[in-house]
Amino acid sequence: MLFLLAVPRQAFSTQGFDSSSDVDWGEIDFTIDGECTCPGNYWNEVGLKYEYWEPFLVIDTSATPYYSAYSGKQESSSGSSFSSSILNGGKNKSSDAIDNGESTFAQAHGFLVDILTLCSRSDYGEYWSETDSLWQSDLLTAIIEPEAALFANKISQLACIVDATAVNIGFPLDYLSWCIGSGGSAYPLTGRVADDNTVQANSTIAAKLIFLLNRKFMICDPAETEGCGCSYTPIWVKSHYKMAVRRPGAANVYPLGKSALIYGANINIPYEGTMGPNDEFMWVVYRKKICCTCCD
């Protein structure tokens, strides 16, 4: 039986998300793709099709339950029915003792941001993993989501080596949907990753949350249409997303699953700086968006 216990609060209060400085506006990459058609009452309308990378989601991955790098402060834990030992999940800080091959655990939060919405989208809600029992337990997730056993095995994970190679040269393999490049397998869809590199592990956890939000129909993929609408993709198209870490350090935008050995230097320095405490990460997520001017 689980009891409601207060989660110890940390004295964290730092700079939250700021679209003017945290969005890489050079990554928007607005292009015109020619004509498109939209269904009308009596005939099809002709419009102009364009695409760009939309900064639509901010994710924070936290070693401290209910701390949000997005808001820059510790949030209330009154909505949780889980004990602090469950929410902490074991090893979750870079200062914890590390054994070779030890896993890393983090809570994750997703926040939709309306910054450059030029055509319709069908996203909704916020996500807080502290209220999600499946996020806390690999075993429970394996029972509730049996497809995890299909992908969370040695053979399927070996295939992720191919994806890792492709991601690190800029071409994630969408047909290996269970892989997150150098992060390994997306399964199980929990806050635990078999990696003791804190930056890499938290990057993988953020990517797992993108996959999970697609699975929960909380976000949609506007690049799967011809410019009108936004399709739900419970099996995600990885190449339609990329992200950049913005707390506690910052790096350039990269495809999901890129090795932290390439971008991770000075991201998680072992003290609290002006941007935020170490081990508390924030990621700005961009998705490919295709729009047509004649669509709503």
Image (tube, grey):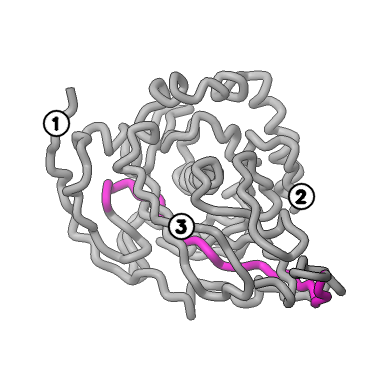
**Image mark for residue 142:** none
From the image, which quarter does the C terminus lie in?
bottom right
Q: Position of residue 112 (x, y in %)?
A: 46, 62
Q: Earlier in the sequence, mark 1 or mark 3?
A: 1
Q: Residue sitting at 52 percent across and 46 percent down?
A: 217
Up-down: is 82 above or below 265? above
Q: Is residue 131 left or right of residue 208?
A: left
Residue that badge 3 annotates:
124
Q: Does the magenta run of residues contain 56?
A: yes
- Residue range (magenta): 44-66
Q: Please name the amino acid that badge 1 sits on.
A: Phe
Count of numbered circles in the view: 3
Q: Please name the amino acid that badge 2 sits on.
A: Phe
Mark 1 touches mark 3? (CB < 8 Å):
no
Q: Please name the amino acid that badge 3 sits on.
A: Tyr
Mark 2 vs mark 1, foreground winner is 1
Residue that badge 1 annotates:
3
Residue that badge 2 annotates:
171
Whole-angstrom CA distance, mark 1 to mark 3, is 30 Å
